[in-house]
Image (cartoon, rainbow, N blue to C red):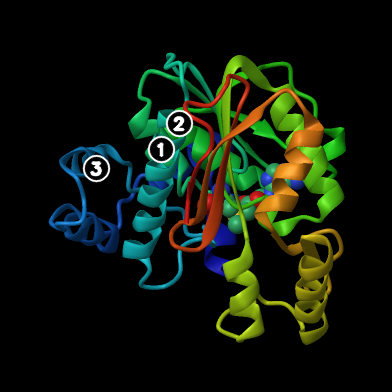
Amino acid sequence: MIMRNAVKKLMPSHLLKLIRPIKYRIIRHDFLRAKHRLQSSIELTDDEKQLLHKVALQVHHSDSMYQPDGALHYLSVGLSASRCIHKAIGSLSNKYPIEEILDFPCGYGRVLRFLRAMFPASHITAAEIDSNALNFCRQTFSVTTLLSKTNLGELSHLQRFDLIWCGSLFTHIDESSAITLLRFFQDHLTERGLCVFTTHGQQSIEWIQSSKMTYGLTEDGQRKIVQEFQTAGYGYADYPNQSGYGISAVSHDRMVELAKATGGWAETLFIEHGWDNHQDVYAFAVQMPNQGVQATR
Ligand SMILES: C[S@@+](CC[C@H](N)C(=O)[O-])C[C@H]1O[C@@H](n2cnc3c(N)ncnc32)[C@H](O)[C@@H]1O
């Protein structure tokens, strides 16, 4: 650390700017190995293998979605998101070119790298509250960035999108913030637009109850989220020592109720724990669904 700070002091800022992108461009061998393993799996279609071939493998050292020795899981989660997005697009009655895409929140690009490979000609906007993550995504995936606000009600943006992907943000906010986020998404869809988002659902509640996964919540927090989910359909508890950011879980009925109250769109797809066999996946579109909601359980 002392050494790094000394280098920073000695090096002119224009040279530092050159070095940072080079650091981001390093491709790690564990990711290369994971990609080859997935590409030789019989569970992937030929299209998915080709998609993986095009996916960028640069991963930032601050990306908390990457766990040690977790390259295979990291790429599998991105691939699983790409499947959900494909299914959501397939749930629309009218196919249309997807020109403008929003990834909100992009993190350090776990899914964004797949979106970039799936839609090479589209303009992608990546939104985050974390400016370091945004810098990395802008430099690595050729996207425009949007710095979000902690208070989602203060967000304003002029553009509209054909496709919005929101992987794991509803999972961290309370019901009133979820309503604000739904309104923001609905307001920012084009007249043909599609919004695909994920939540914790019934399975996550069962995991908390059985202590299989407690999401970093205190015992009080665990009790609160389960009790609220069971009584009101939307449960939320702050992370320890944090306010306004934690873990939520919502029933399908309650989520549909909240989204319907926003108005102007209809549910076209629901896949229970469809993202990485964990989070529930919803699609809402301004245009009408194909043949009613395709619910997969
Ligand atoms: C669980 S991560 C998911 C990141 C990414 N979608 C992925 O799947 O890798 C949640 C992300 O939400 C971001 N976040 C939290 N509050 C936010 C806000 N108000 N606006 C935008 N992003 C936010 C966090 O910085 C974090 O990167």
Residue at disc 3, secondary structure: helix
Task: Calculate the distance from the C-alpha at mark 2 to the C-alpha at mark 1.
Answer: 6 Å
Q: Position of residue 137 (x, y in %)?
A: 51, 39
Of labels 3 and 1, earlier in sequence is 3
Residue 129 visible in the current orientation: no
Residue 48: mark in rendering: 3
Most foreground residue, 274 or 25: 274
Circle 1 sits on which residue? 87
Amino acid of disc 3: Glu
Task: Calculate the distance from the C-alpha at mark 2 to the C-alpha at mark 3.
Answer: 19 Å
Q: Position of residue 236 (x, y in %)?
A: 79, 64
Residue at disc 2, secondary structure: loop
Dots 2 and 1: beta carbons under 8 Å?
yes
Amino acid of disc 1: Lys
Of labels 2 and 3, earlier in sequence is 3
Circle 2 sits on which residue? 91
Q: Is residue 109 above or below residue 4?
A: above
Residue occupying the point 43% across, 34% down: 141
Amino acid of disc 2: Ser
Residue 132 visible in the current orientation: yes
Q: Residues within 10 Å of mark 1 (few under 14, many from 20)?
A: some
Residue occupying the point 71% across, 48% down: 255
**Mark 2 near ligand 1 (CB under 8 Å)?**
no
Residue occupying the point 69% across, 58% down: 251
Left/right placement of residue 30 relative to residue 289 reads left
Most foreground residue, 229 or 166: 229
**Image quadrant assignment for residue 147:** top right
Most foreground residue, 25 or 213: 213
Left/right placement of residue 71 relative to residue 61 reads left
